[in-house]
Image: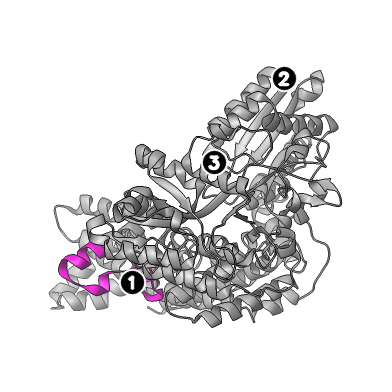
Amino acid sequence: MKGKWRAGLLAATIGFAGFLAGCNGGEKPATSPEGKSNGEVVTIDVFQFKVEFKDQFEQVAKAYEDEHENVKINITTVGGGEDYGAALRSKFASGNEPAIYNIGGPQDVADWKDKLADLSDTEAAGLALDGTLEGVTVEGEVLGLPFNQEGYGFIYNKNVFEKAGIDPASIVDFSSLEAAVKELDSKKEELGLEAVFALPGKEKWVTGLHLSNTFLAPEFEHNVLTAFDAPTVEFKYGDAFKRILDLQNDYSVQPTVSLDYSQQVEELFSLERVAIIQQGNWVYGSIAGIDEEFAQNGIGILPIPVEGYEGDRIPVGIPMYWGVNSNADEAVIETAKDFLNWLYTSETGKEAVVSEFNFIPAYEGYDSEKIADPLSKDVYEYSQKGKTIGWTFMGYPTGWGENELGVQIQKYLSGESSWEDVIATSKAAWEKGRQ
Amino acid sequence: MRIREWSYWLFLMPVLAALVLVVIAPLLLGIYYSFTDWNGIQATGFVGLANYKAIFQDERFLNSLWFTAKFSIVSIVLINVIGLSLALLVTAKLKTNKLMRTIFFMPNLIGGLILGFIWQFIFTKAFAGFGSLVGLESLKGWLSTPSTGFWGLVILMSWQMAGYIMVIYIAYLEGISKELIEAAEIDGANAFQRFWHVIFPLVAPAFTVSMFLTLSNTFKLYDQNLSLTGGGPYDSTQMVAMEIFNTAFKQYDMAYAQSKAVIFFIIVAVIALVQVYINKKREVEM
């Protein structure tokens, strides 16, 4: 009798251990148990990174659910300060695979290729703007649909420029920019400025990714895949790069090495203590949060001039793509594709993309007048005119932009390293990263 | 007797199972991955010791290791000195004892990340503001050079952990019987002699505990490092934990990061064991 009791307890204990182990076990990707039992409801798990439009996106998903009764969309957002790439990897490792997730550039495509479904048969893929699908097309298969377009440049304070008597339209190359900066610097006191620029040296993505891209993209013919395949980097426009960096650093609030994004955008630019910052259309929300009126009427975007190349272009690109998990059930894949397609081609979807998400659409068939914020409008205009520089930084070797070049630039800004060393070290690191 | 052994293991099972699942299995799996070319999604093959060989030529990793070592030594000394001083202060006969204990302990209740951001504000704004008020240039531009970054981290860590260590010292100080101190007093020992020859040897066991805690905490520091300096400027204040994290999740060099983690684990384990062994021995001698 006693022996039996013990055996029972042992069985229970082992069962408990098994239960613990079970937590780690592989669940079927992206289908809920309910979905199976009644064979109707398809559940789409979306794992996305854009924190800024989380609420609006959830509402649009609800609208889709209302139109399609048997679809349930669960949205998980990991982004902002969180590391989306890391979170996505652990999500997949846990066996709880999402049906829709985000991929960035060619490296992501190479990493996730086996887990991405072909989206070339969707209407949205056909409507995507020229060149936006380059980075995600592998052997004729379109593995991602663009989120939106984003662009960056020198965001400037219109009021300050007006008071100083500078016409922003006259800034088309390096010398006119330099002249304007010197003019502003000399009138600093009366304009109420602390400095002309705020260069956030702490944010290695601003210097190592965005700024560097402006000068490396022409070298790679504006094509992210060319960058991705390049075994070496030349820094053909390295001197122009140095000049722009020096200009920003010399006329910036000091010390630049510890200046961060929120100081740059919120504290210094939004409160009109600096006149120009190197940022993109995404800062609109932050500025509007502090000074709605200023954000609406007081800001515009200027090109970053590349000496020896063209001076009047701004870098515009696709920050992220939507991918569909090819491991999911057939019904889930089809519904996921339909949802993404609906998001960018249906009237409800389009309306939301432009006025709710405040996106700069990456697809044809949008009314540009509806773009509400001035920065996005500027970016859209540049992209309409074809005055753009491609985004190639997603084709850099993994981590190179921030951890190699960005770090080297910090060293340069602190006076610990010469520009020649920055270039030489970064070149070597690029080659090492390509091995 | 056999029966007791039986049930003993039986009841231990759940704990053992949990330990194996969340500590031992990941550790072994990690060691296994460190010999492969795992990229976080899949491993395609074994690479032998290649990852480990690369580590010893990896300047960034070695720099971060050296920085961590410097930081740990300075922090351990400061935290223990401050912790013991605070403990002596609040065990003295003062009316505000209870209140002060709470206040000293409080920093420890705030999360590391938040503390990092608070101190970042203090160092970059309050220091600079005070500096320009009294005309001290050295208070400006904190965290923008390697040395201010280093001292920033030390100050933050000492401020946070001293209160915690204080609690440990208090426990031992209050355990000292009054007779011993009285006897010393009658024998004519002054305050310093009483501290050095009576109190100090008696709180020696507390050193073992405190040093172990401070050592492992400072060596493995991540969140304060991330939020205060983020490793900057130019990675000069990047500690090992952060370096490993960046290798894994910025470079996506998972297997390589894993082998760094294994090396790090061995280093921490060896230092901690040696330290406990030496301190234990000293306790016995005294």
Would you name the residue on which mark 3 appears? A51
- Measure how far apart labels 3 and 1 are at the Cα level: 41 Å
Residue B41 point in image, percent of width and height:
75, 55
Asked whether residue A279 appears in the rendered view, the answer is yes
The reply to whether the C-beta atoms of the residues labelled 3 and 1 are less than 8 Å apart is no
Do pointers 3 and 1 mark residues of a single chain?
no
Would you name the residue on which mark 1 appears? B78
B265 with respect to A223 (left or right)? left
Whether residue B237 is in magenta: the answer is no
Do pointers 2 and 1 mark residues of a single chain?
no
- State the residue in front, B202 or A283: A283
Magenta residues, as a range?
B128-149
B49 with respect to A300 (left or right)? right
Asked whether residue B280 appears in the rendered view, the answer is no
Q: Quadrant of the N terminus of chain A?
A: top right
Q: Residues within 10 Å of mark 3 (few under 14, many from 20)?
A: some
Instruction: Give the residue displayed 18% in from the left and 61% down from the top.
Output: B92
Would you name the residue on which mark 2 appears? A68
The reply to whether the C-beta atoms of the residues labelled 2 and 3 are less than 8 Å apart is no
Instruction: Give the residue displayed 71% in from the left and 28% down from the top.
Output: A342
